[in-house]
Amino acid sequence: QLYVSGVLVGGLDSVKELQAKGSLSKELDNLKGNKTPLNAPVSVTPQPSVNLDEYLGKLIKSAPVMLFMKGDPSEPRCGFSAKIVGLLEKEGVTFNSFDILKNEEVRQGLKTFSNWPTYPQLYVNGKLIGGLDIVQEMAEDGDLLEQLGVESLNDRLKKLIESAPVMLFMKGNPMEPRCGFSRTMTQILQDEGIKFSTFDILQDEEVRQGLKTYSNWPTYPQLYVNGKLLGGLDIIKELKEDGELLESIGEQHKL
């Protein structure tokens, strides 16, 4: 750890990053002159009524997979953070992140709380998995998702699609559709007496975006029958007009 005039500059990764940007000398000169560091982290202090350990415990458990890193997944602020983000994204791991550069109290406190002195740090269901080296080793040993004990987005989407014989992904719900296409789709299915379940994509952005890629279908609503995509509103309307909708869905799915 490098200190100048009593102020922490950082560890090796921070110094290397400053050097790569060509700002190391200027940063050190500023600190010698007791000026504000160029990359001083923003301190966001937890509410005074909340004990730091209690706050950290809640933060760690705020998502099933939680990554404490420098920067965020779209703009990592160090090479180690960029690498672990790349590994998690490559393996399809769904995770939330916390930028430790924006909260010095969390940055320093988490080292003591978890007895782990460096970043990034990866937690699963509130338990520390480790840093980049451990995650890299797990990835090299095989299925990272399985070893972490978490579900991939594709697995989650598959379960949702197969959660009912006839499954409609829509905006809103049948009682309160949130767009005209979803309203028309539910009306057609109800008029045909078809029993179906729904999922409101407006309540889950991850599902909303992921399902477009999973099924290679860019719009909503989307209707699935026995785990397979039947189509969107245009296809359902065409099937109804041709008198083939009930045949395509199956007589057994009538109310």
Image (spheres, rainbow, N blue to C red):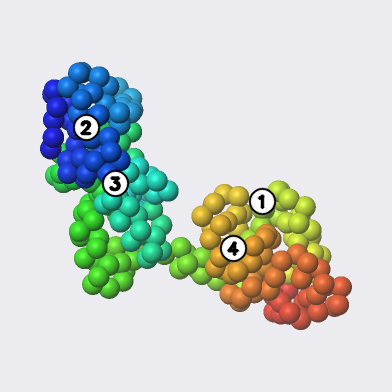
Q: Which mark is residue 99?
A: none
Mark 2: which secondary structure?
Answer: helix
Q: Is residue 117 left or right of residue 223?
A: left
Sequence-wise, the earlier of marks 1 and 2 is 2
Q: Quadrant of the N terminus?
A: top left
Label 3, label 2: how far apart the Cα atoms are: 19 Å
The answer to whether residue 135 is above or below residue 178 is: below
Q: Is residue 93 left or right of residue 254?
A: left
Mark 1 or 2: the one toward you: 2
Amino acid bearing label 4 = Lys
Amino acid bearing label 3 = Cys
Mark 3: which secondary structure?
Answer: loop
Q: Which mark is residue 172?
A: 1
Mark 4 or 1: the one toward you: 4
Q: Nearer the viewer, residue 46 or 119?
A: 119
Sequence-wise, the earlier of marks 1 and 3 is 3
Mark 4: which secondary structure?
Answer: helix
- In this view of the protein, can residue 46 be seen by the observer? no
Residue 72 position by quadrant: top left
Residue contact at pointers 4 and 3, CB within 8 angstroms = no
Mark 4 or 3: the one toward you: 3
Amino acid bearing label 2 = Ser
Residue matched to label 3: 78
Sequence-wise, the earlier of marks 3 and 2 is 2
Residue matched to label 2: 25
Residue contact at pointers 4 and 2, CB within 8 angstroms = no
Residue matched to label 4: 212
